[in-house]
Amino acid sequence: MGRGKLILIEGLDRTGKTTQCNILYKRLQPNCKLLKFPERSTRIGSLINQYLTDDSFQLSDQAIHLLFSANRWEMVDTMKKALLEGENIIMDRYVYSGVAYSAAKETNGMDLDWCLQPDIGLLKPDLTLFLSTQDVNSNAEKDGFGNERYETLNFQKKVKQTFITLLENEMRKGDESIRIVDVTNKGIHEVEALIWQIVQPVLTTHIDQNNFFFFSG
Ligand code: DGP
């Protein structure tokens, strides 16, 4: 038996990531786990939640960056165990959000390379789907936008640019696990079909039990 597949869906706030993760998760039952980052239920996750929802809670950009990374590290054993047992994992955000949101702050010294450092060694997804929209303004008009710290139109535009730079850099270096899916003006089922076309061949590819990939510098 080969190991399970690690599949990541990334994107800006309100691009439909969570909806698509849930659809894929249901489709892959009973052989699938769903992980969402930040995982707010842990002690580290509850600090992150406080930071996102309470503007008066102050942390340096470096400190919150490291907490987001630590929150991913605390799930590594769970992830490895599931994959070794042949279970697939769908992830709603992960390392690329970690790098893109922090680097978009343009804080002195926090460039893309610096932001990736604490995540080096984490499991690398077998497939990353970045849900890209050409219309960031319409995301910002959706219900609930603005409830959390990073949900401002200007910041989202910077995050989008940072995501694209980061992912295109990786693709230029030969990373074939990243796919950009344009979701502009597309309905839920249309996006679901596009995603399934890309995911299905990855699910049917055999990967040996102990053959894991890792983020590297
Ligand atoms: P979500 O629960 O998917 O809405 O994510 C919460 C917010 O946190 C969202 O604005 C994206 C941001 N975010 C997610 N992961 C990271 C991370 O690792 N680092 C930073 N700086 N922000 C992140």
Image (tube, grey):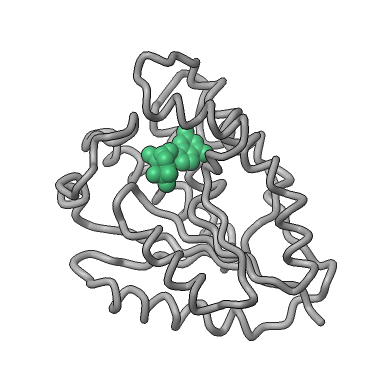
Residue 123 image position (x, y, % from top left)? 70, 54
Q: Residue at x 34, y 29 (%)?
A: 149
Residue 190 image position (x, y, % from top left)? 28, 78
Seen as rendered, the residue at the extreme right is 210
Q: In which quadrant of the rendered view does residue 192 lie?
A: bottom left
56 lies left or right of 147 = right
80 lies left or right of 90 = right
Q: Is residue 114 above or below residue 162?
A: above
Q: Residue at x 31, y 38 (%)?
A: 158
Residue 204 image position (x, y, % from top left)? 63, 85
Image quadrant containing the N terminus: bottom right
Q: Nearer the viewer, residue 29 or 124?
A: 29
| Number of dots carrying numbers | 0
Q: Is residue 176 above or below residue 49?
A: below
Q: Residue at x 51, y 26 (%)?
A: 110
112 lies left or right of 123 = left
Image quadrant containing the C terminus: top right
Q: Is residue 120 above or below residue 88?
A: above
Q: Report whether residue 100 is seen.
A: no
Q: Report whether residue 105 is seen.
A: yes
Q: Quadrant of ligand 1?
A: top left
Q: In which quadrant of the rendered view does residue 53 lie?
A: top left
Q: Is residue 103 above or below residue 163?
A: above
Q: In which quadrant of the rendered view does residue 56 lie?
A: top left
Q: Residue at x 49, y 55 (%)?
A: 92
Residue 77 image position (x, y, % from top left)? 77, 50
